[in-house]
Amino acid sequence: QVQLVESGGGLVQPGGSLRLSCAASGFTVDYYAIGWFRQAPGKEREGVSCISSGRHFTYYGDSVKGRFTISGDNAKNTVYLQMNSLKPEDTAVYYCAAARQSSQAMCVGNIGDYWGQGTQVTVSS
């Protein structure tokens, strides 16, 4: 059974950091592009960062470039999103997804074959 489970969300002050984890089971993450998406109340879901199968290419949305880093650990079948210099506008539910797409196509097209249940990130003082 294919499953993606996000963890690592929480409440953090502006300027702080969080690391989100996306643990996969039922398939090998290295064979899929894995992406992080977020959806804030009243807003559409947006692609935050995606990494290609084989981990050769990454894509970052303009709003997170230079602050977020996506990476993968094949031994743990897990993909991470390191989020630094967090801002209140980063507050959202963050979802991970897997897709047979390029990293850019996945993030820009908001595409996922499998989705996790989401984890809440709140940036507030």
Image (tube, grey):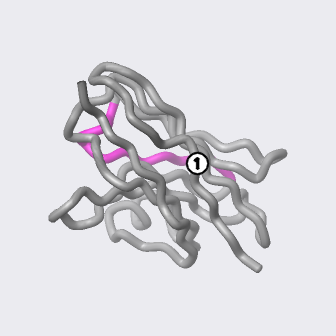
**Can you name the residue that lies furthest to the left here?**
42
Q: Amino acid at mark 1?
A: Ser
Specify the quadrant of the image occupied by residue 4: bottom right
Q: Is residue 32 above or below residue 36?
A: below
**Can you name the residue that lies furthest to the top here?**
15
Specify the quadrant of the image occupied by residue 111: bottom left
In the rendered image, residue 109, in percent from the top left (x then y), is placed at 34, 70
Q: Is residue 115 above or below residue 20?
A: below
In the rendered image, residue 90, in percent from the top left (x then y), is placed at 28, 41
Q: Secondary structure at mark 1?
A: strand
In the rendered image, residue 63, in percent from the top left (x then y), is placed at 24, 40
- Give the quarter of the figure containing the N terminus: bottom right
- Give the quarter of the figure containing the C terminus: top left
Q: Is residue 62 left or right of residue 34?
A: left
**Residue at position x 71%, y 76% from top?**
2
The residue that mark 1 highlights is: 7
Q: Is residue 46 left or right of residue 21?
A: left
